[in-house]
Image: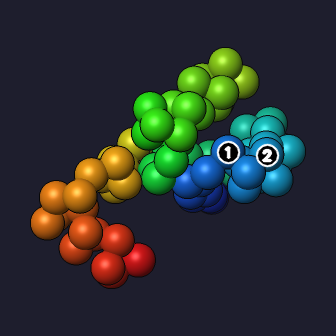
Amino acid sequence: MKKICVLTGTRAEYGLLYHTIKSIEKSHKLQLQLIVTGSHLSARHGHTIDIIKEDNIKIDYEIDMLIDSNSKSSISVWGFL
């Protein structure tokens, strides 16, 4: 079985990826690995990770990118993206 890793960071592109994610989940030859990051984890941006959870999609990893912060570490993370 091949693992397919999908990374989603915004509600807009999650909507575009939704059917692909569901197809991978249904496949007997593929295994979905989902990484959620970016504005999905931001309360300021609606904490849209809840939408993914409501869609009953298993989330393997959550990577907080500190987008709601002006700290030095937050600024350095965005400087490398």
Q: Residue at x 56, y 32 (%)?
A: 46
Percent position of residue 53, x then y? 60, 23
Q: Quadrant of residue 23?
A: top right
Q: Which is nearer the eye, 29 or 70?
A: 70
Indicate whether 52 appears above or below 21: above
Image position, residue 22 (x, y; %):
79, 39
- Dot 1 lies on which element? helix
The answer to whether 34 is drawn above or below residue 81 in the figure is above
Q: Nearer the viewer, residue 30 or 70?
A: 70
Left-right relation of 43 to 52: left
Residue ID for mark 2: 15
Question: Which residue shows up at 51% across the image and 31% down it?
Answer: 47
Asked whether disc 1 touches disc 2, contact meaning CB atoms under 8 Å apart, the reply is yes
User: Residue visible at 27% across and 52% down?
Assistant: 69
Amino acid on which disc 1 is placed: Arg
Query: Which label belongs to residue 34?
Result: none
**Is residue 35 among the parts visible in the rendering?**
no
Q: Identify the disc placed on residue 11.
A: 1
Residue ranking furthest to the left: 72
Q: Pick whichever, 64 or 18, lies toward us.
A: 64
Is residue 65 among what the camera can see? Answer: yes
Q: In the structure shown, which secondary structural element does the residue marked by tag 2 occupy?
A: helix
* Percent position of residue 81, x then y: 41, 77
Query: Residue at 25% of width from left, 69% of height from top?
Result: 75
Given the current orientation, which residue lies at the most extreme front position?
A: 70
Residue 59 to residue 71: above or below: above
